[in-house]
Image: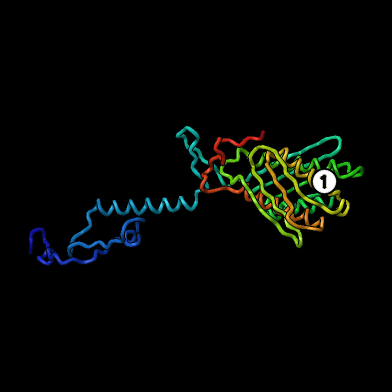
Amino acid sequence: MASGGLSPSAYNHKQMELSVHSHLRSCSFPGLPKLTLRAPRGSLIPTRLRQSFLSLDQEKRTQMQADRTTPSASLVGNNSSAITTLQLDAARIGEVHRVTKETNVSVKLNLDGSGIADSNTGIPFLDHMLDQLASHGLFDVHVKAIGDIHIDDHHTNEDVALAIGTATLQALGDRKGINRFGDFSAPLDEALVHVSLDLSGRPHLSYDLRLPTERVGTYDTQLVEHFFQSLVNNSGMTLHIRQLAGKNSHHIIEATFKAFSRALRQATEYDPRRRGTVPSSKGVLLHS
């Protein structure tokens, strides 16, 4: 027997695989080759080495869990090393109640909704178009309006659009992390309409629809342009609408609302590469 009570075979230098803790057998580290630990027969893993491996494994597991569960992004402020947190999963909601002598309008808009449409403006065709905004933008759109439609639809159409524009402005907040730009062409049978927009903070409308009839149902087709002009004015949006094809007024207008909804959805969604920064070389996007 050798000193210390070990047999001579304990000092055999033939290599063998170590039987190690299950955490060590399953752990791996990105960027490093997979290694098999070997040691002389009968040798033991030093306590400190074993604890180091277990500590590295636990850190890796903790980081993986954090990556799966953390809904926030780290932001570095302009000209500053301060780091804040932006909750990208927080719902962006705008809510407006507009009352005049002509109308009483309530709007609630959720940019991060699921396409819920609940609109009652007293103007059936406008309600139908607001359904397109919800369905194709995946916004939750709640609009209630009482207006002087016994005169005509002008005031109600305008004030609903103004309230939606204001609700959009509220919901966007400082516009950090969003795509900002949206572009979409929507066909509807023979009609094809292209919409391009920029959530720039600068109101502008370029409108080029050629509607062959004065009315769709009871809705005055002149009110389409007025709707978008009112929405643009209060939201701080640059909006271009261009008809590429179409002969049916209903199809042209509906294709316009569908294209607008999809373009707005693109613009309001988050760009993960921005990590919460403002999509502007100026560092701010303000409604002018």
Q: Within 10 Å of the Cα at label 1, are there few (<14), some (14-19), or many (20+) other Cα atoms?
A: some
Is 200 placed left or right of 225 in the picture?
Answer: left
* Disc 1 element: helix
- Indicate whether 156 appears above or below 15: above
- Please state the horizontal and vertical placement of residue 218, each as a whole percent of the image: 88, 51
Q: Identify which residue, 234 or 221, lies in the foreground.
A: 221
Q: Which residue is mark 1?
A: 223
Q: Identify which residue, 84 or 260, lies in the foreground.
A: 260
- Please state the horizontal and vertical placement of residue 153, each as a whole percent of the image: 86, 45
How many marks are shown on the rendered structure?
1
Q: Quadrant of residue 21?
A: bottom left
Is 93 placed left or right of 30 in the picture?
Answer: right
**In percent of the image, x 72 and y 42: which residue is there?**
205
**In percent of the image, x 50 and y 44: which residue is there?**
73
Is 24 placed left or right of 274 in the picture?
Answer: left
Identify which amino acid the numbered label 1 is placed on: Leu
Colour mode of the rendering: rainbow
Give the quadrant of the C terminus.
Answer: top right
Is 236 placed left or right of 65 in the picture?
Answer: right
- Please state the horizontal and vertical placement of residue 267, each as a whole percent of the image: 62, 47
- Indicate whether 247 appears above or below 229: below
